[in-house]
Amino acid sequence: MIQATREANIRAYIETEAQRIDTGVAKTNIRFLAKFINDLDGAVFYGYPTTYTINDRYTLMSWTYNTTPDVYGGRINLKPAGYYKYEIYEVSWQGGVDLASGNAPATETDVLTPPAATKGVVKGLVAIGKLYLAEKSGSEEVQYTEYDQPASTNYIYYGQ
């Protein structure tokens, strides 16, 4: 489970190498497309991580919070706070990686034509899980005020 705060960068350790699909290309030719689905309203957000580090067992990924989302730049703006499902898709390139419109798929079903070594291909789903997005401290939708306990009892007597 990924735990994050709304209006903040997201950093996650996700196991991807055990599920890797395209082992015929180098790690440098692999990128990961994340799909975030809100549990409450079903809103879908996509984004390639801004930074990633592929290790033997896991990949460290991070996305940058920005009010202007960008699938290719790794900028996301998840709203509202709450639970999300996430899906991580492996995208591979035969040639040089180019995270730009027309060269990188924007969704898991996006097929770029005509095929070329500089165009990424979604190989498949490599990880799924849950993300909990907490409200930013002090900006919660529902806020409670805690009152001090009174110094004396505050009984109300009726009919005496």
Image (spheres, helix red, strand yellow):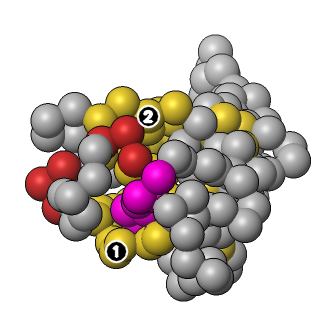
- Give whichever of discs 2 and 1 has the lower sequence position: 2
Q: Does residue 105 appear left or right of residue 145 in this picture?
A: left
Task: Judge the density around disc 2: few (<14), some (14-19), many (≥20) Cα neighbours within 10 Å.
Answer: some
Q: Is residue 35 visible?
A: no
Q: Amino acid at mark 2?
A: Tyr
Q: Does residue 157 appear left or right of residue 47 in this picture?
A: right
Quarter-of-image position of residue 140: top right
Instruction: Compare residues 56 and 104 and report the one nearer the observer.
Output: 104
Q: Is residue 160 above or below residue 59?
A: below
Please name the residue that numbered disc 1 is placed on. 124
Instruction: Compare residues 128 and 152 and report the one nearer the observer.
Output: 128
Q: Residue at x 47, y 52 (%)?
A: 95
Q: Residue at x 66, y 35 (%)?
A: 64
Task: Judge the density around disc 1: few (<14), some (14-19), many (≥20) Cα neighbours within 10 Å.
Answer: some
SS for dot 1: strand
Q: Is residue 1 above or below residue 159?
A: above
Instruction: Compare residues 102 and 131 and report the one nearer the observer.
Output: 102
Q: Residue at x 19, y 58 (%)?
A: 23
Q: Amino acid at mark 1?
A: Gly
Outermost residue on the top side: it is 151
- Name the mark on residue 52: 2
Q: Chief secondary structure of the magenta span?
A: strand
SS for dot 2: strand
Quarter-of-image position of residue 41: bottom right
Magenta stretch bounds = 88-95
For the residues bearing labels 2 and 1, Cβ distance under 8 angstroms: no
Q: Is residue 160 above or below residue 42?
A: above
Q: Residue at x 63, y 81 (%)?
A: 114
Q: Does residue 123 appear left or right of residue 152 in this picture?
A: left
